[in-house]
Image (cartoon, coloured by chain):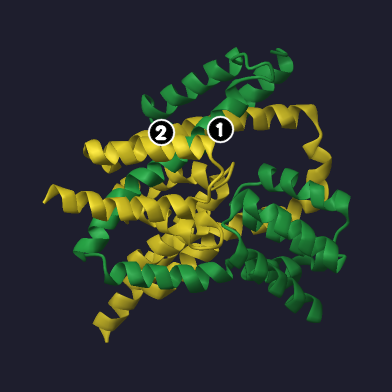
């Protein structure tokens, strides 16, 4: 019981001091190591597993760390801790936003914030594209580029569903990068 | 009595729909919250009409400014808007549900798979697709958010900043909000 509370509290701290995704990793690492719940090698597995399983990265880390430390209940406690900012601060922000939705000032603010938000996602896109469409020597990875174009056509022209497009890409990845060795 | 029962049933139906939709979203979100944006656009805006593109962008911006996992914060917003407090909680738990089940079942064996060559290749393929999904989301949201020269300038400045500087998203959002107020004053 005390272990579960400790796990919960650790992830409350992690949740409130991070903004999701990879920004959680260093915090999780230090909490796991200082409590002795995982060793350094196990901690380094967290990212690999979080990336291979669907769902938000930060919560996958919480689930995996909680599982390792205290089984299924541990995973639950860690997730509840990681979700605590969502259930408190974000809900408050949502209530605030709903309340002032029609205020002229908020409309002006959001008119400025929306393009900034799209710009930030655009920035992430550029970083990810550089990592996935170019190899170490900065040369474009042609099979990856072709797969990207095919994905785009499947999504937009043929209106293929997102899960199916992801599955198609995974199989294409095995064929292109593995079987054909491109 | 019958009316009350009908209302209760329709509420329950919305909550179940919320749970199913957000579980689906949670199950196909690979590569973090950014890929989720495109999935949200398809499911929430196009299929279910629970929010507009603008609203989704607003939620995303606020979710980036509040601590915690961004994707889950967005789920809370959409759930609350669709079915109140309970809707927020249900949508949030639903996003998390599939990954908790999958990790709980596979945590032991997944490590052995992570080093296999074909698994690595499959995920290289998935990452290529994730980029395409984000690209789609950016284009869709661009058309709704960049409405004049001023918003285009904000977009370009933040894009350049996000690519070159290591600044927290919170700073960008606050600065852009201030810019929104100042620029609208100049207009009038």
Residue at image location 70% in from the left, 73% down from the top: A8
Q: Nearer the viewer, residue B45 or B184?
A: B184
Task: Reply above or below: A65 against A100.
Answer: above
Q: x%, y% of residue B146?
A: 27, 39
Q: x%, y% of residue B111?
A: 81, 44
Residue B49: tell me if it is visible: no
Q: Nearer the viewer, residue A172 or A58?
A: A58
The image quadrant where one finds the N terminus of chain B is bottom left
Q: Residues within 10 Å of mark 2 (few under 14, many from 20)?
A: some
Q: In the rendered image, which residue does mark 2 sit on?
A: B136
Residue B147: tell me if it is visible: yes
Q: CA distance from mark 2 to mark 1?
A: 16 Å
Q: Nearer the viewer, residue A4 or A15?
A: A15
Task: Reply above or below: B36 against A136.
Answer: below
Q: In the rendered image, which residue does mark 1 sit on?
A: A127
| In this rendering, position of residue B139 left or right of residue B37 | left
Q: Nearer the viewer, residue B143 or A166?
A: B143
| In this rendering, position of residue A4 left or right of residue B93 | right
């Amino acid at each position: 019981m005390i272990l579960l509370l400790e796990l919960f509290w650790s992830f409350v701290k992690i949740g409130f001091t991070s903004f999701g995704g990879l920004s959680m990793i260093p915090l999780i690492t230090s909490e796991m190591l200082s409590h002795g719940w995982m060793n350094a090698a196990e901690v380094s597995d967290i990212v690999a597993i979080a990336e291979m399983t669907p769902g938000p990265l930060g919560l996958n880390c919480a689930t995996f760390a909680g599982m390792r430390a205290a089984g299924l209940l541990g995973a639950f406690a860690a997730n509840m801790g990681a979700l605590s900012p969502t259930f408190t601060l974000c809900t408050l922000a949502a209530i605030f936003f709903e309340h002032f939705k029609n205020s002229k000032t908020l409309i002006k603010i959001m008119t400025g914030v929306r393009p900034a938000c799209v710009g930030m996602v655009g920035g992430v896109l550029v970083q990810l594209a550089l990592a996935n469409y170019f190899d170490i020597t900065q040369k474009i990875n042609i099979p990856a580029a072709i797969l990207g174009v095919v994905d785009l056509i499947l999504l937009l022209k043929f209106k293929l569903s997102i899960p199916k497009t992801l599955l198609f890409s995974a199989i294409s990845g095995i064929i292109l990068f593995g079987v054909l060795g491109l | 009595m019958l009316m009350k029962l009908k209302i209760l049933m329709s509420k329950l139906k919305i909550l179940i729909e919320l749970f199913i939709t957000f579980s689906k979203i949670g199950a196909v979100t690979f590569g973090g919250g950014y890929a989720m944006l495109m999935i949200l656009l398809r499911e929430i805006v196009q299929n279910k009409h629970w929010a507009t593109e603008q609203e989704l962008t607003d939620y995303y911006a606020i979710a980036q400014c509040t601590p915690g996992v961004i994707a889950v914060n967005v789920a809370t917003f959409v759930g609350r808007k669709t079915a109140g407090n309970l809707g927020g909680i249900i949508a949030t738990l639903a996003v998390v549900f599939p990954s908790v089940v999958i990790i709980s079942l596979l945590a032991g064996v997944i490590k052995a798979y992570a080093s296999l060559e074909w698994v690595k290749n499959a995920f290289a393929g998935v990452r290529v697709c994730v980029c395409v999904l984000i690209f789609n989301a950016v284009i869709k949201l661009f058309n709704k958010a960049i409405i004049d020269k001023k918003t285009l300038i904000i977009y370009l400045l933040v894009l350049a900043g996000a690519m070159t500087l290591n600044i927290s998203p919170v700073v960008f959002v606050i600065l852009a909000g201030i810019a929104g107020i100042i620029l609208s004053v100049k207009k009038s």
